[in-house]
C-alpha cells in the first residue's frame, strides 16, 4: 500500500473514484471548490463524468439522473450551497436513490442542516463526520456502499481543515466494480422484464394511484432500521470520567488531544465523538456518560448538537456548552477554538465547575 | 390501394375499433384520468409511437416533470424517472452522460419548463446535451385549475388574471422555442400542435427529427407541443382546438424554428 501526502479534497476524490463513483457535478464555493477541482481532474480519466453545473440546483439534479441509471454518483458544496439542494435531498430519500453528498462546510454551523434538513416530509440522511483525512478517505469509500445498501443518501460532513489539510494517507485501493442494481432505470428495464420507474411517491408502471400512507410507513420503518444499525462513534477514557467531552469533526481532534493530555495529568475526563451525526450514537453516549457528573459539548456554533446530547442524557447530568460561535474574518470557519490551549482551557473549566 | 365494396346488407365481419385499441405497445393504458379534450395524452402517444418506430423501445428513458401529465407517467412503458418541478433537463443530463446510447427525453409542461425550470433547460441546451426535451405548452397551470404561466398570452383569462393577462401588470409571454434556438448547443428546435390531424402528423415528424438529432449526436433538441386545455381556458371542450389555433397559436407560432444542420 502506497502512502502519499494529499490534501483532504484530493484524497476524498480519489477515495470516491476508487469506490466506483462515476459521476460528479458541482458549483464552486470555498472551501468545497478544491473537491470539485479534484473530481474534474481525476474522474474523466477513470471513465466517469464531472460536470461544472450552472447552479447547485442543477448539480444535484444531474447527480439524481446519473444515480437513476444505477451509476454511483455524488455532489457537494458548502452548507450555503446545500441549502439550495434541500428540495431535491428530501425527494431523493423518497425516490430511494443512493446519493453521496459532501458538505465542505464553513465550520460547524450546518449540524442542524445535516441532521434535520430543510426539505419536506419525514426524511433522513445518514451523516458521517470524519475527524481527519485518513478517516475521510475510509468513510468516503464506505459511504457509497452504505448509501446503496439502504438506498438512502449519505452526507459526509467536512470543513475547511479537512479539505485543505495535507496528510500522508494510503492511496485508496479500487474496490471491485459495483454490480448494476436491478432497480436502475437506464433504458434497459423493458428488456429485463418490464420498465423500471423511479418515483418519489412510489408510483410504478401500470399503477392507477398509490397508497400514500403505506408508502410513508415503509420509509419510516426503513429509517428506524438504519437508526438501529448505522450508529458510529469513538470514545476514550469514559469509564471513570467525571466529565465527558462530546465533539465531532475537525474540532474533535483538538478535544481528543486535550483529553489525552489532561488524562496524563490525572484528570478524570473522557472523550466521546459521534462519527455518525445521524443516526446519533445515543446508546453508546448514554453508556459512556453513565457515571459522569457533567457532559461538556464542544461545538463551533450557537448550540446544535447539544440538543441530541440532551435527548440522550435525559437530565441524568448537566449538559453544558463549552463551544460557541467562532470563525475567521472570511467566515470560512477557522475559529479561535482551533487551538489546543483554548480547547484544554475550556475543558479544564468544565472540570472545575463539576468539582465545585 | 385495392378497392373494396362495402356491403350494407349484412353486419361487418370485423367489429369497429376504438382509437384506444390502436394504442402503441409502450402505452400501458388506453384510458386516462385527465379532462375531456386535453391535448397531453395525444402528445405522449406520439412520443411513445416514435420510440417504437425508431426501434428504441428497449433502450429509452423518460424524465417526467410535474403537472397534469404526471398522472400519465405510470402508463409509460419504458424506463422513467419522476423529477421535481422544473428539474427534468438536469436529470436527463446526468442520465445521458452515464448512458450515452440510450434515447433520453423529458416530458414537461410550460409551468414546469418555462416558469420553474427555465434556467435548467437553457443551460442544458447551451451545453448541447444529447437529450430531447418535450414541452407540452397549454399556456396555463392546468393541474391547479387554470392559473397564469410564463407562456400565457396577453389577454388570456386565467384564475389569477381575471381580466386577461395584462403586460403592464403581468409581463409578457415567453416563447421558449425562439429563445433556445440561437444557442450553439441546440441542434433542432420546433413547435408543433395537436389541435387537428394535419398538425398531429406534422408534430410527429418534428419529434422524429428531434430524436434523430439526439441519436446522431448533433446536440440538444426540443419540440414544443401546443396542447389543448379547455378546462384551464374556460371554454367548452369542443372549442379547445379552435382556441388553440386562434389564441395560443397566434403568439406561439407553429413551425420549425431551427432545422437540423445539413448532413454531408
Image (spheres, helix red, strand yellow):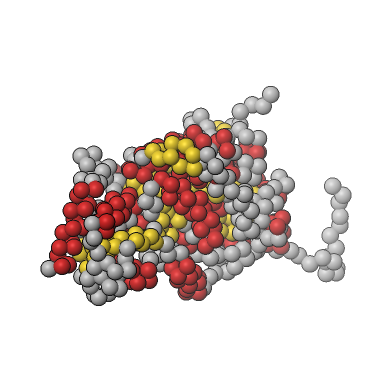
Question: Vertical placement of B191 versus B241: above or below?
Answer: above
Quarter placement of the N terminus of chain A: top right
Give the image quarter of residue A327: top left
Along the line of sight, the residue nearer the viewer: A232 or A218 = A232
Q: Quadrant of the C terminus of chain A?
A: bottom left
Describe residue A270's horizontal placement relative to residue A75 as left or right: left
Identify the residue at image location x=36%, y=56%.
A114
Task: Identify the residue at horizontal 59%, vertical 38% (top origin).
Answer: A47
Q: Position of residue B68 (x, y in %)?
A: 50, 59
**Residue B166 against residue A189 in the figure, above or below:** above
Does residue B251 appear in the picture of this structure? Answer: no
Vertical order, A133 against A252 (above or below): above
Q: Residue drawn 43% across and 60% down? A: A126
Query: In front: A85, or A76?
Result: A76
Residue that lies at the very extreme toward the left in this rendered image:
A356
Front residue of B44/A207: it is A207
Q: Is residue A264 visible?
A: yes
x, y percentage for residue B188? 57, 35
Most extreme residue toward the top is B264
On the image, which quarter does residue A44 sit in?
A: top right
Number of marks in picture = 0
Q: Is residue A102 left or right of residue B200?
A: left
- Horizontal and vertical percent for residue B70? 52, 59
Residue ID at (52%, 44%):
A172
Residue B97 picture location, percent across and down? 57, 41
Amino acid at each position: 500500500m502506497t502512502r502519499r501526502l494529499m490534501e483532504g479534497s484530493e484524497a476524498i476524490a480519489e477515495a470516491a473514484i476508487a469506490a466506483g463513483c462515476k459521476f460528479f457535478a458541482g458549483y464552486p464555493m470555498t472551501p468545497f471548490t478544491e473537491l470539485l477541482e479534484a473530481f474534474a481532474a481525476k474522474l474523466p480519466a477513470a471513465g466517469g463524468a464531472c460536470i461544472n453545473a450552472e447552479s447547485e440546483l442543477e448539480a444535484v439534479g444531474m447527480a439524481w439522473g446519473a444515480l437513476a441509471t444505477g451509476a454511483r454518483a455524488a455532489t457537494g458544496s458548502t452548507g450555503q450551497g446545500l441549502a439550495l439542494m434541500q428540495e431535491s435531498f428530501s425527494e431523493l430519500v423518497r425516490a430511494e436513490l443512493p446519493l453521496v453528498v459532501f458538505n465542505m462546510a464553513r465550520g460547524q454551523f450546518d449540524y442542524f442542516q445535516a441532521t434535520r434538513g430543510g426539505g419536506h416530509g419525514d426524511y433522513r440522511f445518514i451523516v458521517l463526520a470524519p475527524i481527519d483525512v485518513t478517516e475521510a478517505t475510509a468513510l468516503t469509500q464506505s459511504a457509497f456502499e452504505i448509501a446503496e445498501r439502504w438506498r438512502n443518501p449519505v452526507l459526509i460532513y467536512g470543513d475547511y481543515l479537512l479539505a485543505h489539510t495535507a496528510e500522508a494517507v494510503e492511496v485508496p485501493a479500487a474496490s471491485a466494480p459495483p454490480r448494476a442494481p436491478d432497480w436502475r432505470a437506464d433504458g434497459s428495464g423493458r428488456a429485463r422484464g418490464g420498465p423500471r420507474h423511479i418515483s418519489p411517491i412510489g408510483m410504478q408502471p401500470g399503477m392507477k394511484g398509490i397508497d400514500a400512507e403505506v408508502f410513508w410507513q415503509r420509509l419510516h420503518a426503513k429509517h428506524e432500521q438504519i437508526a438501529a444499525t448505522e450508529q458510529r462513534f469513538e470514545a476514550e477514557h469514559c469509564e471513570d470520567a467525571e466529565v465527558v467531552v462530546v465533539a465531532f469533526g475537525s474540532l474533535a481532534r483538538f478535544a481528543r488531544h486535550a483529553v489525552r493530555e489532561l488524562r496524563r495529568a490525572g484528570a478524570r475526563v473522557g472523550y466521546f465523538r459521534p462519527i455518525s451525526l445521524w443516526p446519533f450514537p445515543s446508546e453508546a453516549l448514554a453508556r459512556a456518560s453513565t457515571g459522569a457528573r457533567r457532559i461538556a459539548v464542544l461545538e463551533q456554533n450557537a448550540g446544535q448538537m447539544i440538543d441530541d446530547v440532551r435527548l440522550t442524557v435525559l437530565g441524568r447530568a448537566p449538559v453544558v456548552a463549552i463551544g460557541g460561535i467562532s470563525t475567521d474574518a472570511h467566515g470560512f470557519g477557522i475559529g479561535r477554538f482551533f487551538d489546543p490551549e483554548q480547547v484544554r482551557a475550556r475543558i479544564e473549566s468544565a472540570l472545575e465547575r463539576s468539582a465545585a | 390501394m385495392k378497392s373494396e365494396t362495402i356491403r350494407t346488407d349484412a353486419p361487418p365481419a370485423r367489429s369497429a375499433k376504438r382509437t384506444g385499441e390502436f394504442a402503441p405497445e409502450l402505452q400501458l393504458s388506453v384510458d386516462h384520468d385527465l379532462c375531456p379534450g386535453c391535448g397531453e395524452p395525444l402528445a405522449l402517444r406520439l412520443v411513445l409511437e416514435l420510440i417504437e418506430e425508431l426501434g428504441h423501445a428497449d433502450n429509452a428513458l423518460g424524465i417526467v416533470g410535474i403537472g397534469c401529465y404526471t398522472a400519465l407517467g405510470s402508463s409509460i412503458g419504458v424506463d422513467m424517472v419522476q423529477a421535481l418541478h422544473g428539474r427534468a433537463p438536469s436529470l436527463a443530463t446526468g442520465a445521458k452522460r452515464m448512458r450515452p446510447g440510450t434515447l433520453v427525453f423529458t416530458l414537461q409542461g410550460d409551468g414546469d419548463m418555462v416558469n420553474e425550470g427555465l434556467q435548467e433547460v437553457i443551460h442544458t441546451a447551451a451545453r448541447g446535451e444529447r437529450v430531447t426535451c418535450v414541452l407540452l405548452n397549454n399556456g396555463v397551470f392546468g393541474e391547479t385549475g387554470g392559473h397564469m404561466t410564463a407562456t400565457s398570452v396577453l389577454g388570456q383569462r386565467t384564475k389569477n388574471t381575471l381580466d386577461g393577462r395584462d403586460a403592464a401588470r403581468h409581463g409578457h409571454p415567453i416563447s421558449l422555442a425562439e429563445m433556445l434556438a440561437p444557442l450553439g448547443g441546440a441542434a433542432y428546435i420546433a413547435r408543433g400542435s395537436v389541435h387537428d390531424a394535419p398538425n398531429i402528423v406534422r408534430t410527429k415528424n418534428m419529434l422524429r427529427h428531434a430524436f434523430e438529432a439526439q441519436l446522431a449526436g448533433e446536440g440538444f433538441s426540443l419540440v414544443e407541443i401546443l396542447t389543448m386545455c379547455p378546462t384551464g381556458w374556460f371554454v367548452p371542450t369542443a372549442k379547445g382546438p379552435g382556441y388553440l389555433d386562434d389564441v395560443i397559436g397566434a403568439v406561439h407560432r407553429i413551425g420549425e424554428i431551427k432545422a437540423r444542420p445539413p448532413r454531408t
